[in-house]
Amino acid sequence: MKKGKGIENPESRFSAVLLAAAKLPGVRIDREAYLRSALARHCSEDVIRRAIEETPAAAGISADVLDKLASDSIRFETGKVSALSAAAGIPGIFALPATVPADLAQYFGHMVRIAQKLAYLYSWPDLFSDEGDDVDDATMGVLTLFFGVMVGTQSANAAVGKVAGLMAEQVAKKLPQKALTHGAIYPVVKKVASYLGVKMTTQSFSTTVSKAIPLIGAAVSGGLTFATFLPMAKRLKKHLAGLPLADPSHRVTDDGDVVDGEVVEDHESFAAPHAERHDSDTAVVRLEEPQP
């Protein structure tokens, strides 16, 4: 039996939803404005300026301050996405064709928002540096890997570490376009996108069931969103915070040399040397990574 196009290509299905979410109003975070606002109560103007012009790590901002700011952003985005999800559950079964796609889009949109905030705190470059609504392939690739980290795929963990290592090695202020679009990391991006496309289909079914009963569906939907979004955001935070790119000891000298920065060589495999162990508060949903 010939399978439908959507079933045949979960990678394209996921990428289409991610792209649509990235284009929603209010999803893109202005890196400079966010860092300035977040750091205002904790750092001097000189430190803030250096964090914006270079990175928070280069500015020497402590891990404790970054941890607090990251946790604050996670709480804000989790509360917002949970409230919107609960509101989408109120109309009940007769409104499902309208509410489920909208709920999925806003859920992904908030995942993109928290991914940007955490990335900027932990010294990643601007993910949406280009003007206009277009999203380049490198940004799509790194967001896909961030989502993979959120759901607990080890190949995504290792690939994000690889990307961070390349940027630390090259003292780069932009994402490594070649590696993410047709280099060594690209096959992992495709694998993770396909996996997420499959999970998106099964989770959409759960979301539909949770919205079938008015009012009760609202509570269940909001609670389900809270129980999944929060641990996923914490998982990404933990992983990004543990990368050399976020280490304040990572410095750049006047001649451009990296001091005390761990470099990931191109020939290294994607085995995760420091695979993250999920604590009880981040293990609400356990997902198994598909075999290559």
Image (cartoon, grey):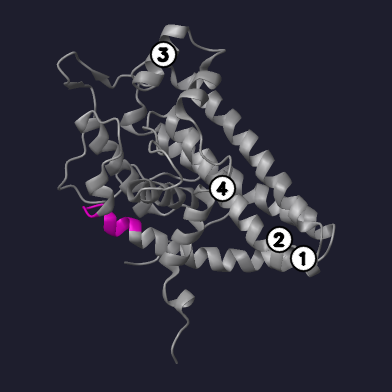
- Type of amino acid at the residue the image marks with label 1: Ala
Mark nearer the N terminus (1 vs 4): 4
**Distance from the alpha carbon under mark 1 to that under mark 3:** 48 Å
Residue that protrudes farthest toward the right in the picture: 215
Residue at point 30%, 19% (across, down) = 249
**Distance from the alpha carbon under mark 2 to that under mark 4:** 16 Å
Q: Is mark 2 on a helix, strand or loop?
A: helix
**Distance from the alpha carbon under mark 1 to that under mark 4:** 21 Å
- Percent position of residue 142, x then y: 37, 46
**Distance from the alpha carbon under mark 2 to that under mark 1:** 6 Å
Magenta residues, as a range?
182-189
Residue 113: which numbered mark, if any? none
Observer-side mark, 4 or 3, equals 4
Mark nearer the N terminus (4 vs 3): 4
Determine whether, in the image, residue 291 is placed left or right of residue 95: left
For the question of whether residue 7 can be seen, the reply is yes
Q: Do the residues labelled 1 and 4 touch (CB within 8 Å)?
A: no
Q: Name the residue carrying label 2.
A: 99
Residue at point 34%, 25% (across, down) = 247
Dot 1 surroundings within 10 Å: few (below 14), some, or many (20 or more)?
some
- Type of amino acid at the residue the image marks with label 4: Leu
Closer to the camera in the image, 207 or 231: 207
Q: Is mark 4 on a helix, strand or loop?
A: loop
Residue at point 41%, 52% (across, down) = 144
